[in-house]
Image (cartoon, rainbow, N blue to C red):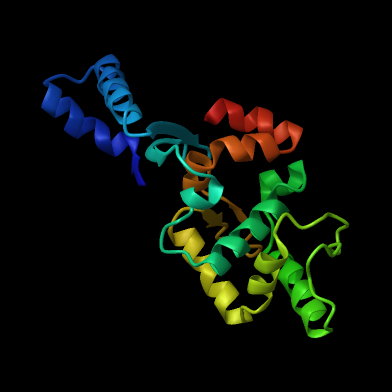
């Protein structure tokens, strides 16, 4: 995947085209999008509310959500990301404000305690009463991660744009630009009603 800030790309494209017309810029990228379609790739845009900038991304349309995440992340890291996403999508408040790191880690700690007790984690009810969206194997793989590994993974997910973390004292985790570009369909289908309506306008 390649993600760029549209504002940074406009000058170079406009110089190449010999004009500064936004319509020509849109036409240029429309032609690129059509060409990418033959390769099962898609060119997507998102207007990121945190900096009010437009971002472009070239997205793989084939495979499922896991295939879209198949970068340098390990299966355990992908599973941890899904845990955080599920917590964010739990309700409109979480979707807008994010979730604190401890809330995300507490869910996986519950699995670790269940595994240590010999009962296994698969199919268990989480503390908030929701059913885990992960398989038993995924839950067990996350449960085996150390607290340090989980924290490092969350930082990596923020660096790579899958998540973003507030710089205030709360430091809540929210969905990042890359998540909206690459997981658009999944997020819109799983989002709480108010958040879905808001996200549809920015995607």
Q: Nearer the viewer, residue 5 or 134?
A: 134
The part of the image, by quadrant, that contains residue 72 is bottom left
| 69 relative to 27, above or below | below
| 128 relative to 144, above or below | above
- Coordinates of residue 46 in the picture (x, y in percent): 47, 34
Q: Residue at x 69, y 57 (%)?
A: 99
| 67 relative to 103, above or below | above
Q: Nearer the viewer, residue 12 or 74?
A: 74
The part of the image, by quadrant, that contains residue 17 is top left
- Coordinates of residue 61 in the picture (x, y in percent): 44, 37
Q: Residue at x 65, y 66 (%)?
A: 138
Q: Residue at x 32, y 21 (%)?
A: 30
Q: Is residue 137 shown to the viewer in this render?
A: yes
Q: Nearer the viewer, residue 96 or 137?
A: 137
- Coordinates of residue 191 in the picture (x, y in percent): 69, 39
In this picture, residue 110 sits left or right of residue 62: right
Total labels drawn: 0
The part of the image, by quadrant, that contains residue 127 is bottom right
In this picture, residue 41 sits left or right of residue 196: left
| 144 relative to 95, above or below | below
Q: Residue at x 88, y 57 (%)?
A: 129
Q: Is residue 168 shown to the viewer in this render?
A: no
- Coordinates of residue 11 in the picture (x, y in percent): 20, 32
């Amino acid at each position: 995947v390649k993600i760029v800030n549209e504002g940074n790309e406009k000058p170079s494209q406009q110089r190449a085209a010999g004009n500064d017309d936004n319509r020509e810029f849109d036409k240029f990228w429309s032609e690129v999008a059509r060409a990418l379609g033959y390769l099962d790739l898609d060119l997507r845009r998102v207007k990121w509310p945190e900096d009010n900038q437009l971002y472009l991304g070239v997205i793989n349309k084939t495979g499922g959500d896991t295939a879209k995440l198949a970068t340098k992340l390990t299966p355990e890291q992908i599973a941890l990301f899904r845990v955080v996403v599920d917590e964010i999508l739990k309700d409109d408040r979480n979707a807008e404000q994010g979730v604190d790191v401890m809330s995300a880690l507490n869910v996986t700690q519950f699995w670790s305690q269940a595994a240590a007790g010999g009962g296994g984690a698969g199919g268990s009810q989480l503390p908030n009463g929701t059913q885990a969206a992960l398989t038993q194997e995924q839950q067990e793989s996350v449960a085996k991660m150390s607290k340090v590994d989980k924290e490092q993974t969350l930082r990596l997910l923020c660096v790579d744009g899958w998540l973003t973390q507030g710089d205030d004292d709360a430091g809540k985790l929210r969905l990042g630009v890359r998540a909206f570009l690459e997981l658009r369909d999944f997020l819109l289908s799983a989002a709480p009603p108010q958040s879905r309506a808001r996200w549809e306008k920015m995607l």
